[in-house]
Image: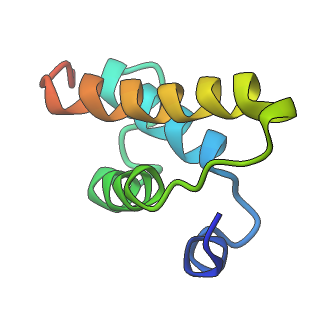
Amino acid sequence: MPQSIREILGEASLLDVALDLHMNTTGSGDPWAIDPARCVEILEMAVRDWEEGPTYRKAFDDAVKNLLVVALQEHKAGVQI
């Protein structure tokens, strides 16, 4: 993960951001707890700047990247409640 994303995230992880966006989108979380636009910005940056790692962790990395993409697609589809 590029250093710029690490600095933006602070103590959070990309999985935290994806889950926050998913919960905000589906209504399963506090709608005022996060800034959805900021989550989208972070996840889009992460997907855009994604760097392939070693082959031994490809399956896990692909699953994480796919989760980020799904959270973005879900939000952009307008599922928000």
Q: Which image quadrant: the C terminus?
A: top left
Residue 14 shown left or right of residue 26 in the figure: right
User: Is 32 rendered above or below residue 67?
Assistant: below
Q: Nearer the viewer, residue 59 or 10?
A: 59
Residue 63 shown left or right of residue 42 in the figure: right
User: Is 54 rendered above or below residue 27?
Assistant: below
Q: Which image quadrant: the N terminus?
A: bottom right
> Residue 45: horizontal and vertical position, in percent?
39, 62
Q: Nearer the viewer, residue 72 or 31?
A: 72
Tell me how the rendering is colored: rainbow
> Residue 50: horizontal and vertical position, in percent?
52, 54
Residue situated furthest front in the rendering: 55
Q: Nearer the viewer, residue 43 or 39?
A: 43
Q: Nearer the viewer, residue 52 or 71?
A: 52
Residue occupying the point 37% across, 56% down: 48
Residue situated furthest right in the rendering: 56
> Residue 12: horizontal and vertical position, in percent?
70, 58
Residue 17 shown left or right of residue 43 in the figure: right
Number of marks in the rendered image? 0
Q: Which of the 4 image quadrants contains residue 49? A: bottom left
Q: Which of the 4 image quadrants contains residue 25? A: top left
Residue 73 shown left or right of residue 15 in the figure: left
Residue occupying the point 42% across, 51% down: 43
User: Is 38 rendered above or below residue 47?
Assistant: below
